[in-house]
Image (cartoon, rainbow, N blue to C red):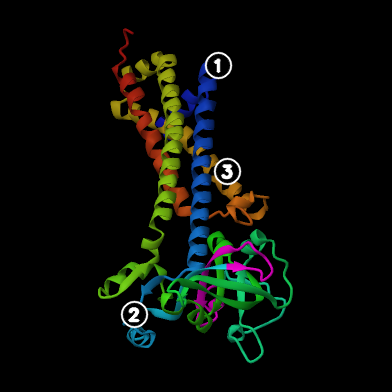
Amino acid sequence: MSLNRFLGFRFLFHRHHSALFYFLSLLSVALIALSLMAFLSIQAILSGFEEDLRDKVLGMNPHLRIMLSDQDSFESLEAKLNQDKNVLALQRVILGEALLKLPQAKASQGVQLMAFAQDPRRFTSSLRFSALLDFAWEDLKSKENQLPSLVIGEELVKEMGLIETVDQELDLIYPFGQLGPTGSLEPIKKTFAWRSNFTSGYFDADSRWVLLNLSEAKALLGDFARRELWVFLKDSNQALAFAKKWPGLQIKPWQEEHSRLFSALSLERWGARLLLVLLLALGVLTLMNVNFLLVLERRLEITLLKALGLSVSKIKLLFSQMALFLGSVGGLVGLVGAWLFCTWIQSTPFALPQAYYVEKIPVHWRWDHGLLAFVFLIFLCFLSARLPAKRSIELSIHE
C-alpha cells in the first residue's frame, strides 16, 4: 500500500474523529447514493415512457404521409416510390370525418374515418382485432345481399355504450354530402355492419377511429375524401432524410407531425435531469464539508507531514483520494441500487391509472448512461477536494 493511500485511510477511519465528522461522512455518501439512484431510475423510466409512446405513435401512423392533390394518382406515385430501396411498404389511405350512430338512436358521435386498401395489421404489431368471427380485410366490402362492415376502436365502443353482437348495424353519416333539389347540402347516410373492435394502445386512435375498406370510404365521402399515401421505411429514423429527397411532394415525416409531443417529453427529461443534478451537487458539497472538517481536525498531523518533507502534490493527492473513495462508495451503491430498482419495476406489475394507457411502467435501462453518470460523479468528487487541499497546503507549523 502506498504512503498516500495509507495516510488517507488513516485520516478517514481514525477512532478519535468527532461525531459531526462521522455524521457528515455518512450523510454525503447517502446523498450521493440516493441522488444517483434517483437520477438513473427516473431517466430510465422517462426513456421507457418516451419509447413506449413512440412505438404506439408509429404503430398507428406511418413513417411519412404524402398528401395527394386531385391531379395525383396512387398508381403513378407508387411506381416512383417503389424504386427507392429504403421503402418497405406503401399503403393507400382515405381520411374523413363523419357521424356514427345506432339506427334507432338519436344521439351520434363524431369519428375519424380511416379507410385502408390493405389490412393495416400488416404494417403494425400493436393493432389487434377482437373479432367475434374471423374475417379478412376484403370481407369489409359490400357484397350482394350483405352490408359493408367496419371496425371500431375499443375506447369509442365504451364511450358510445355499444354492446358487441354479430353484425350489429350502425349508420355512418357524412353531413356535407350532396346538393339537394333546393340547392342545400344534404347528408349522405350509409349503413354498415359492425364487424369487430380494435385496440392499438394508442388512445387517440382507440377513441376516435373507425376503420373501413377504401372503396366504401370513396362511396361515402365522394370528392370530399382526403387521399394520402402512407410510406413505411426500413429505418424509421431516416424519415426526415427521405422527405428531403422528394421536394415536389406534400410529405410530412413522423418527427414533424408529432414534434410538439416529443419536444415536450424531451423538455420534461431535461428538467428532471437538472433537478437531480442539483441534488447530486448537494451530496458533493457535503463531501467537500467533510474534507474541510478533516483539515480542521487533522491540521497538526498535516503540518507535521509537511515538516517531514511530504510534497504539496502528495497532500493534494491525499485529499483527492479520500474524496474519490467516499464518492465511489456512494456512486457504486447508487448505480447498483438504480439497476436493481429498475429490474424490480420491470418484473413487478403495477396497477397504473387508466389515463396513462399502459399495462406496466415502461423502463429502458442503459448501462452506458449509468456508467457515464458514475464517471461524471467521480469527476465532481475530485473537484470537491481541491479547495480543502488548498487550505491544508496553506497551514503552517505556527498555526
User: Which quarter of the figure is the N terminus placed in?
Assistant: top left
SS class, disc 3: helix
Give the answer, above or below, for where 8 lies relative to 71. above
Q: Residue at x 49, y 47 (%)?
A: 43
Mark 1 is on which residue type?
Answer: Ala
What is the C-alpha distance between the residues marked 3 and 1? 27 Å
Residue 164 sits in quarter: bottom right
Q: What stretch is highlighted in magenta?
A: 100-124
Crowding at dot 2, Cα within 10 Å, few <14 / some 14-19 / many 20+, comes out as few
Disc number for residue 337:
3
* Position of residue 73 measured from the top left corner of the image (x, y, whole percent): 36, 85
Crowding at dot 1, Cα within 10 Å, few <14 / some 14-19 / many 20+, comes out as few
Give the residue number, with chain letter if any, for mark 1. Answer: 19
Give the residue number, with chain letter if any, for mark 2. Answer: 70
State if disc 3 and disc 2 touch (CB < 8 Å). no
Give the answer, above or below, for where 13 lies relative to 101. above
What is the C-alpha distance between the residues marked 2 and 3? 60 Å
Mark 3 is on which residue type?
Answer: Gly
Q: Nearer the viewer, residue 319 or 130?
A: 130
SS class, disc 2: loop
Q: Nearer the viewer, residue 272 or 316?
A: 272
Mark 2 is on which residue type?
Answer: Asp
Q: Which of 328 and 227 is in front in this view?
A: 227
